[in-house]
Amino acid sequence: MDDPLYIDKRFSVPSYAIETSAIRSSGPGGQSVNKTNSAIQLRCDLNSFHIPETYRRRINNFRDSRITQDGVVVIKAQNHRSQNRNLEDAVRRLKSLLKKAIYVELPRKKTRPSWSSKKRSIKAAKRRSEIKSLRGRVKDW
């Protein structure tokens, strides 16, 4: 991995901060699982490069067992039989984890229902009321 991993326009992870190592997998692969190192363990030290301070606070407050207290993200990928696909999977999971950690939900804007939507609601309620009243007993006068 030579290119930086872009999380958003203000935040990217440089390639030197990401360390990968091949380890034995317990996943699919049959008997070759005992002979090959197809799983990938990805470690990303978030303290080794510049992160905007607001993002750093959000990442530190984010509750995820993959982020250690030292600020190192550890991801183990072993879903695929191929080492390359596991590497791609680990990088994709790192990116989605960091995106989720820095995401802030915008506050809800209070809105009022429009005049016409109120009218439609009242009209629909009256229609339902009439339909339900017709389900009752028939009065014989």
Image (cartoon, helix red, strand yellow):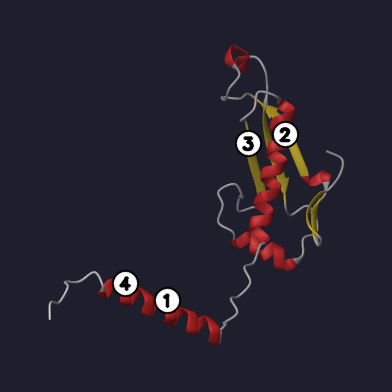
Looking at the rendered image, the disc whose residue lies closer to the viewer, 1 or 3, is 1
Determine the secondary structure under disc 3: strand
- The image quadrant that residue 91 belongs to is top right
- The image quadrant that residue 89 belongs to is top right
Disc 2 to disc 3, C-alpha distance = 9 Å
Disc ID at residue 124: 1
Question: Taking 138 as reference, is 75 above or below it?
Answer: above
Residue ID for mark 4? 131
Tell me which numbered mark, 4 or 1, is placed earlier along the sequence.
1
The reply to whether discs 1 and 2 touch (Cβ–Cβ < 8 Å) is no
The reply to whether discs 3 and 4 touch (Cβ–Cβ < 8 Å) is no
Disc 4 to disc 1, C-alpha distance = 11 Å
Tell me which numbered mark, 1 or 3, is placed earlier along the sequence.
3
Residue ID for mark 3? 76
The reply to whether discs 2 and 4 touch (Cβ–Cβ < 8 Å) is no
Determine the secondary structure under disc 2: helix
Looking at the rendered image, the disc whose residue lies closer to the viewer, 2 or 4, is 4
Q: Amino acid at mark 3?
A: Lys
For label 3, count other residues whose C-alpha is less than 10 Å away and answer few (under 14), some (14-19) or many (20+): many
Residue at 64 percent across and 40 percent down: it is: 75
For label 4, count other residues whose C-alpha is less than 10 Å away and answer few (under 14), some (14-19) or many (20+): few
The reply to whether discs 2 and 3 touch (Cβ–Cβ < 8 Å) is no
Report x, y in % for residue 88. 73, 36
Question: Taking 6 as reference, is 53 above or below it?
Answer: below
Q: Amino acid at mark 1?
A: Ala
Residue at 49 percent across and 80 percent down: it is: 120
